[in-house]
Image (spheres, helix red, strand yellow):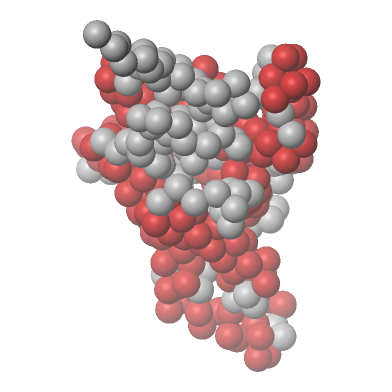
Amino acid sequence: MIQRPKTHNRLPPSFPRARGGRIGSSPEATAGGRRRGARRGPGQTDKMNAFRLAGDMTHLMSVLLLLLKIHTIKSCAAGDKQFETAAALRCEREKVSEDWERRRWVMNDRNCVSLKTQELYALVFTTRYLDIFTDFISLYNTIMKLIFLGSSFSIVWYMRRHKMVRRSYDKDHDTFRHQFLILPCLILALLIHEKFTFREVLYHTSFSELLHSVMWTFSIYLEAVAIFPQLVLLQRTRNIDNLTGQYVFFLGAYRLLYILNWIYRYFTEPNYVHWITWISGLVQTLLYADFFYYYFNSWKNNVKLTLPA
């Protein structure tokens, strides 16, 4: 009898494997399981589950909620819309410094969105989605990337360029030096990233692949601490309006849902291991722990949310 030759489900040596098994479809890591520059091998499919979808939608809700707030009330600070609009128009029309000082005094007693945090998020999405026009994963993935890029830069533009919104920005309290977060994250990404073995870098990695890997890892590290300037600002101003509180809460909930997604994938997908993403996500979630405590206390007791100075 003629025996059929045995076939091996093995990729050729020149065909790079994605670390962690199947390829993720989430925008977080072209997000969550795929190494930069790796092509799809046999049996690799896009995976979606309820935790990941809930995390994506929660993340999307947080960003759109903040953008809608700024666009609607033409302010990045909490307060009455009519008062803020009238005060801004009067300052613009009459050039009365007393009105502006009074308006600043009122705003400083409330809270504001941190421009530093929004600039960090814009940098996170820019460095994470360098492959947006070269590496197609799915229509869902591409749309989510475009939304996060567009919304983050829109928020930064509003706070820096819009003549009414930028006047409501409390730069006197938002003084956290966010550049001190960027440099350590970049150095760490150069030292520890997905293509971390010397053999891979020397023999199997092009400059483009290495750049994408380092920038993607940098975005993961930076996202873990990007909320820090916002939390510091909220502690300084103490009083938190509902929309800003919900924005921060949804950001924290998104990361918590992604941790549940990683746990689910770890037990359902073979060889799914991503220490960089896991540790960074855990650090990011821990930063929200104090905020979550006071948020749930205020919700439980039906009182206004305040943070200790």
Point out the residue furthest to the top here.
1
- Quadrant of the frame with the N terminus: top left
Image height check: is 109 above or below 184? below
Q: What x and y, as percent, mark residue 168? A: 59, 66
The residue lying furthest to the front in this view is: 1
Q: Nearer the viewer, residue 97 or 192?
A: 192
**Which x, y percent locates residue 297?**
29, 32
The residue at the point 59 percent across, 69 percent down is 158
Q: x, y (%) of residue 272?
A: 41, 19
In the figure, is residue 168 to the left or right of 142? Answer: right
**Residue 210 in picture, x, y percent from top left:** 71, 33
- Res 240 visible: no
Examine the rendering and report whether any part of residue 183 can be seen: yes
Apparent side of residue 133 relative to residue 148 in the rendered image (left or right): right
In the rendered view, does 62 fall on the left or right side of 300?
right
Q: Quadrant of residue 305?
A: top left
- Front residue of 183/35: it is 35
Write the residue at 78% across / 20% down. 202
Vertical relation: 106 (above or below) 94: above
In the displayed structure image, the side of residue 145 where residue 95 appears, left or right: right
Q: Is residue 72 above or below residue 131?
A: below
Q: Residue at x 32, y 49 (%)?
A: 57
Quadrant assignment for the C terminus: top right
When asked about the image quadrant of residue 37, the answer is: top right
Tally of numbered tags:
0
Q: Nearer the viewer, residue 201 or 287?
A: 201
